[in-house]
Amino acid sequence: MNFYYYLVSFFVEFSGILTSVALPFYLTEILKVSRMTIGFTGFIWSFSYTITTVISSKSPNYKKSISYVYTPFFAGITFLLIPFLPLYLIFSILFLTGIFYGRFWPSIQNYFQPYSHTSSVGFFNLSWSIGAISGTLLSGVFYSFHPKFPFFIAGILCLFSTIGFFIFVKNFHPEREKFSDREEDKEEKSERFSMKVVNEIRISNFITFFIIGTLSFLFPRYGLELGLSPSFISSMLTIVITVRTLTFFLLVKRPVIFNSKFLLNICMINFICLVLIALFNKSFIFTLSFIIMGFLGAITYHNSLLIHLKSRLPAEIHEAIIGAGLFSGPLIGGVIAQISDFKIAFISLGIMIILIYPFHKLLKRT
């Protein structure tokens, strides 16, 4: 397998996270926007991402797409434009960015589908997760250097990602032919999942990214209001991704992790973490909560990606669920924070999460 696919995954995730963490700082300190506007910013990017993945999954040729080659180039242009645009055009740019990312991630995941029974999927998760760690950690540092600097770095790396394909990769499907239809059919029959398992894993993945999306866009603003520095805020968000990456490393060769109480545990633990963040302005509480959420995020993502690849379900659905969590969390949280404050917003979201489990059980009985 060509190492460049891992490198591009790193670059694209690094650029996206670098931008998404720096953007709330930029909007708050430079453009002086409201809390609800911060939440809407997270919504618009993730909403277009989700819509794109859903539409793409309906295409009969979605598994043959090589969108991962050219979409980073267009995403890079949008990143470079952000610091020079007024707010309403930034919304338009973010909508386009969501489309480009919504094409990139499912297409590169489908590239790895023939390797779903190998450790390649695990190393793929590691590559983009390391990019997420680096982007989150450096976003505050780059922003402190200059508010526009994170967007320039993100744009340049994405442009290089596409250019590099034409330099380092001669055939964009170089090794897939080694996997014959007979081998793929054998792998497809090797593991099946009931719809109960599939649905509960999908819901749990939605929940964790609902919370991660909320904190990614709203915690920077919340932290600034608490008097925290951009570097400290980005280091807190880095904890989530670092723990997720370390957990991915442990999960490289592990099968799907699931039991009858899996969804209930996900709801309960996320609820507790949100309440702790809302009620206690302590570095230790922030650190502990983010560590736990990073661990949960790795498990739910690992489960979801594996069941979609092994069951030959569209990777676009996996990404659409993630996107739905990422756009709904900041939007709902931003609206509640605008009406009241961040503490009430986080507790309200926690209550919503805890109610998902009985609601899901009720729907199963009807």
Image (spheres, helix red, strand yellow):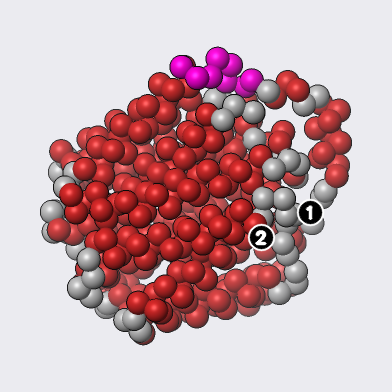
Residue 131's place in the image compared with 276, above or below, is above
Say which label, 1 or 2, has the lower sequence index: 1
For this rendering, which residue is in front, 244 or 192? 244
- The magenta segment is 167-174
Q: Mark 1 Cα within 10 Å, few/some/many (few <14, many 20+)?
A: few
Residue underneath mark 1: 193
User: In the image, is 152 to the left or to the right of 164?
Assistant: left
In this figure, what is the number of numbered marks? 2
Residue 181 visible in rendering: yes
Relative to 224, residue 157 above or below: above
Kindly identify the residue that appears in the image at 49 percent across and 38 percent down: 9
Which residue is more in the foreground, 27 or 336?
27
**Horizontal and vertical percent for residue 54?**
54, 42
Q: Is residue 47 visible?
A: no
The residue lying at 81 percent from left, 26 percent from top is 181
Question: Badges 1 and 2: C-beta atoms under 8 Å apart?
Answer: yes
- Asked which secondary structure carries label 2, the reply is helix
Q: CA distance from mark 1 to mark 2?
A: 11 Å
Which kind of residue does numbered mark 2 sit on? Ile
Left or right: where 315 falls relative to 168:
right
Asked if the magenta segment contains residue 173, the reply would be: yes
Amino acid at circle 1: Phe
Identify the residue at image location x=53%, y=55%.
Answer: 245
Q: Residues within 10 Å of mark 2 (few under 14, many from 20)?
A: many
Q: Residue at x 83, y 48 (%)?
A: 191
